[in-house]
Amino acid sequence: MKVRDCLVRMLSSMPVLACVAVALPASANAAPLPLPTLLPSGPLSTKGNQIVDRHGRNVRLACVGWNEVNSHILLEIQTRLMASHGFNCIRFSWVNATMEENLKQIDFIARAAADAGLRMILDNHTNEPGHSDRDNWGAQQRNGLWYDLGGASDGTDGGGNRGTTTDAKFIRDWEAVARHFAGNQTIIGYDLRNEPLEWPGMSVWGGGSDRDIRSMYLRAGNAILAIDPDKLIIVEPPNSDCRGVRNDPLTLNVPGKLVYSVHEYPGEISGQKIDSGPGLIRRMNEFWGWIVNENLAPVFIGEMGASMSSPGSKAWAATVVPYFNGTGPDGLRLGEGGQGLSTDWWAWGNLAGQNPNGTLEPDWKTPRPEQEAVYAKLRQKPLEE
């Protein structure tokens, strides 16, 4: 079977196991590209507000978001392009209702990523497939929860799709993912839930109800670590608002594995009225920057980005880049030798007509210079030997 046929089958959610042998690079054991931006080998952990490698060196994730594989260029070419453009990991999504097929796709991608020297973070995006406005408000599940059957749900995902995932199944699914990738050093962390929301009837932080996402993170995180203690556990409070963590922090059974996550987009994407300048800095400090400044845990910017074609997005970037790097006024205090915040730029590829419109020009190889000018400033500093 031709490689292009394999990719088309994968995109159409057909079985892909028959494709793997043909579509992978000829040398599966080829040495990763010797790029200084790549992460060191081995599992990662946390120390204070830093992510560290197995030797205790501070490292910085420079991820690129990727939700689907396309047939424009081969997987091994795409992953090597990612590495050559300065990214060192991929944040890739899976969905509960399509988990088995997603895992086959991720196996396929992880092998190409490993060959390029990239690592991967897996995030649970929604319970049901389809990220349309009708189904899930685009990036978010409409009911704001991590499940869509039983409990506080109405038996749907809030967007008209019948629910298939209970709270208990959600935990079991993460356990299945953990077993599947146990010992796989390419997969470095699990982002337990994408963009939970805190509006009436939706997720809350703490309190013990069936809407308490902190409880889910504790149960899911500990269940994963009982299977594979090497992985980072990444948790995003509802609405990326970490203020509840101050009085109700999360403590996992395996120390040094917890990372908090927030998403930061300019107002043209996020709807935030104040999206640059001192007002944005005050909001970030209040919502989540204090976790970094008090050296409690790392914060991962689990999604960020824009097409970078408007004055507003440029003002946003001029604010967040020095803030994330710990060089801006009234910003983050990273400590001596600290790496800047780990980030995930949205999104890989050419997404014509969208905002963000993807990192690549229509030729699918040239980086968009207006975006590269921003994410190039968020790379890992050289590691000390």
Image (cartoon, helix red, strand yellow):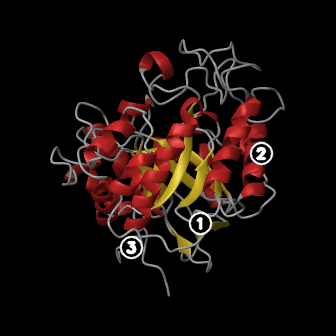
**Residue displayed at 76% across by 63% down:** 255
Q: How many marks?
A: 3
Residue pushed farthest right?
Answer: 208
**Residue displayed at 39% across by 73% down:** 32
The answer to whether residue 7 is above or below residue 165 is below
Q: Quadrant of residue 161?
A: top right
The answer to whether residue 296 is above or below residue 67 is below
Residue named by callout 1: 51
Q: Which mark is residue 32?
A: 3
**Sooner in the amino-acid sequence: mark 3 or mark 1:** 3
Label 1 to label 2: alpha-carbon separation: 20 Å
Label 3 or label 2, whichever lies nearer to me, is 3
**Sooner in the amino-acid sequence: mark 3 or mark 2:** 3
Q: Quadrant of residue 381?
A: bottom left
Q: On the picture, is 232 further left or further right than 379?
A: right
Q: Amino acid at mark 3?
A: Pro
Label 3 to label 2: alpha-carbon separation: 35 Å
Where residue 336 sits: x, y (%)? 56, 76
Residue named by callout 2: 218
Residue pushed farthest bottom?
Answer: 385
Q: Amino acid at mark 1?
A: Ile
* Neighbourhood count class around disc 2 (C-alpha, 10 Å): few under 14, some 14–19, many 20 upward: some
Where residue 207 sits: x, y (%)? 83, 32
Label 3 to label 1: alpha-carbon separation: 21 Å
Q: On the picture, is 345 further left or further right than 326?
A: left
Q: Is residue 225 visible?
A: yes
Check disc 3 and report its element: helix, strand or loop.
Answer: loop
Where residue 305 sits: x, y (%)? 37, 44
**Residue displayed at 42% across by 63% down:** 88
Q: On the picture, is 53 further left or further right than 271?
A: right
Where residue 344 sits: x, y (%)? 44, 51
